[in-house]
Image: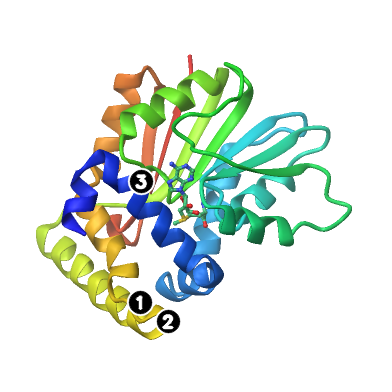
Amino acid sequence: MQEHLTATAKKQFYVNRMFATIAPRYDLVTSLLSYGQDQRWKRKLVAMAEVQPQHQVLDLACGTGDITYLLARQLGSGQATGVDITPEMVELARRKQPSNETRVRFETGDICQLSFADASFERITAGYAVRNVPDISRLLGEVFRLLKPGGRFLSLDFGKPEGHFYRWAYLGYLSATGSALGWLLHGDPDVYRYIAESIKHYPGQSGVQRLLEETGFVECGFITFLGGAIAMNWGSKP
Ligand SMILES: C[S@@+](CC[C@H](N)C(=O)[O-])C[C@H]1O[C@@H](n2cnc3c(N)ncnc32)[C@H](O)[C@@H]1O
């Protein structure tokens, strides 16, 4: 796994294969690993996005569509688009769509190279997405291109606690529970142990804020949950 997470070209291949495997159990495992807190963090992300009824919003790496549907609830004439690279995830997201819900659409695609025109969206969200891409700066450049001036980007992801002992214990906990769940559900301990390993290679909330500022975002900030184990970053396009 180490080799795949450090080599840019191999990481996306590894991530794609892993999410295709876990897609049918993704909602269950997310709820278990977060002790049911995940929905609360997602609602907070959407509340902080301050979506207006006419907005065009994009949900990056939408997975099974939780955040996309929450965003759509804020919309009137606007549209929420969810994009994910894993067809199995997109299929699960589409299955949740009520027949009368016209404010949501889903597409399969790579969030680091999207075909939408420049300045297409007022809001862009990302749930546990930034940590998974091979090149975060490239992703943030793409987000910047796609936002309208004044538009806002918000990202929810695992964080990196500041305290060394807490960080060590938290990564150990994620690694152990991830291995056990992976073995139980898929016969492969590496499937969810990936979370802890990917956090080690991730710059965390402070690093993401620095990368946002380097990309040109303004009014950047973050809040943390569980003492820094989970974080939400944001920034606006001037
Ligand atoms: C941990 S899941 C998060 C799903 C959802 N956003 C949520 O919060 O529940 C990460 C998702 O990122 C997707 N993903 C990873 N790399 C991607 C990429 N380059 N482009 C689009 N989606 C990607 C995976 O397919 C997976 O569905």
- Which mark is in front, 3 or 1? 3
Is label 2 in contact with label 1 (beta carbons under 8 Å)?
yes
Tag 3: residue type?
Gln
Q: Is residue 23 left or right of residue 78?
A: left
Q: Which residue carries the number 2 mark?
A: 185
Count neighbours of disc 2 (C-alpha within 10 A) and say few if under 14, some if 14 to 19, many if 20 or more.
few
Which of discs 2 and 3 lies nearer the camera? The answer is 3
Q: Position of residue 33 (x, y in %)?
A: 40, 72
Q: Residues within 10 Å of mark 1 (few under 14, many from 20)?
A: many
At numbered mark 3, what does the secondary structure look like: helix, strand or loop? helix
According to the picture, the residue beneath numbered tag 3 turns out to be: 12
- Judge whether 197 appears above or below 157 on screen: below
Label 1: which secondary element: helix
Q: Earlier in the sequence, mark 2 or mark 3?
A: 3
Residue 161 appears in the rendering: no
Judged left or right of residue 165, residue 52 is right
To which residue does mark 1 refer?
182
Mark 3 to mark 1 CA distance (whole Å): 20 Å
Above or below, 109 relative to 196: above
Q: Is residue 212 left or right of residue 119?
A: left
Q: Which amino acid type is shown beneath numbered disc 1?
A: Gly
Residue 5's disc number: none
Spatial CA span between label 2 and label 3: 23 Å
Residue 4 rendering spot, x and y as whole percentages: 23, 51
